[in-house]
Amino acid sequence: MRFSSIDFLAALMIVVAVAARAAAQDASPLPTQIRPDQGFRPLVEEAASRSATIRDLIDRLEHLDVTVYIRVSALMASDLDGRVALLATATEHRYLVIEIARDRPKIVQMSTLGHELFHATEIAAEPAVVDARSLAAHYASIGVRTRHSGGYQMFETEAAAAAGERTRQELMTKRARSVHGT
């Protein structure tokens, strides 16, 4: 069988299209359950590329019944780098939001992301967490309350703090590569 130059070009275009799609998939796009604000997406992707902890947490969340929105917040208390909250529950799926303080250095934002993603896995692993009351009860059983004012409660767990610190260490040892690969 002989191929014409048009057949060859058509086949070449298909190969290039398939290769481009495979390369895009190999670039590890975030799963649909992880939804950062468009302007914050590059930071989340960079953090995932530099931190095995963040990649692992994202992989775990991908298989759980949650969608996690990630956004920066200018309204964060000055002593708070980030937080996670339950937005809503629909049937058996929960929607969480992670807020990261806008005015922090990049390394702090990325470390905080690891910390808050760990909290998201803590919530996702407990199907009984479906509202603010069950969320507070869950954290009262696994963590320590750090704030309580005006009906607003905050908790911390040793495991999430450790995940944030592990993320920071990974980020410090694996610097981002420049355009020139250095």
Image (tube, rainbow, N blue to C red):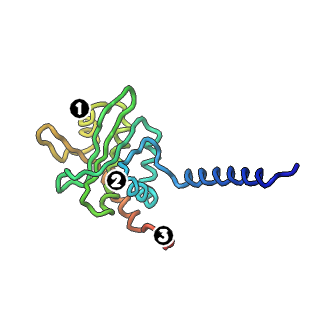
Residue drawn at point x = 88 percent, y = 49 percent? 1
Task: Using the image, tell me which numbered label, if any, was put on residue 133.
Answer: 1
Of the pair 16 and 109, the residue shown nearer to us:
16
> Which residue occupies the foreground of this view, 123 or 93?
93
Count of marks overlaid on the render: 3
Which sits in the foreground, 142 or 123? 123
Query: Which residue is at a point 33% across and 30% down the rendered structure image?
Result: 89
> Gap in Å between the C-alphas at discs 2 and 3?
24 Å
Mark 2 = which residue?
113
| First-in-chain label (2 vs 1) | 2
Any mark on residue 179, and which?
Answer: 3
* Discs 1/3, front: 3
In the image, residue 157 sits, relative to residue 79, either above or below, namely above
Mark before the other along the chain sequence, 2 or 3: 2
Q: Is residue 23 above or below residue 94?
A: below
| Image quadrant in which you'd find residue 67 | top left
Q: Is residue 76 left or right of residue 42?
A: left
Q: Secondary structure at mark 3?
A: loop
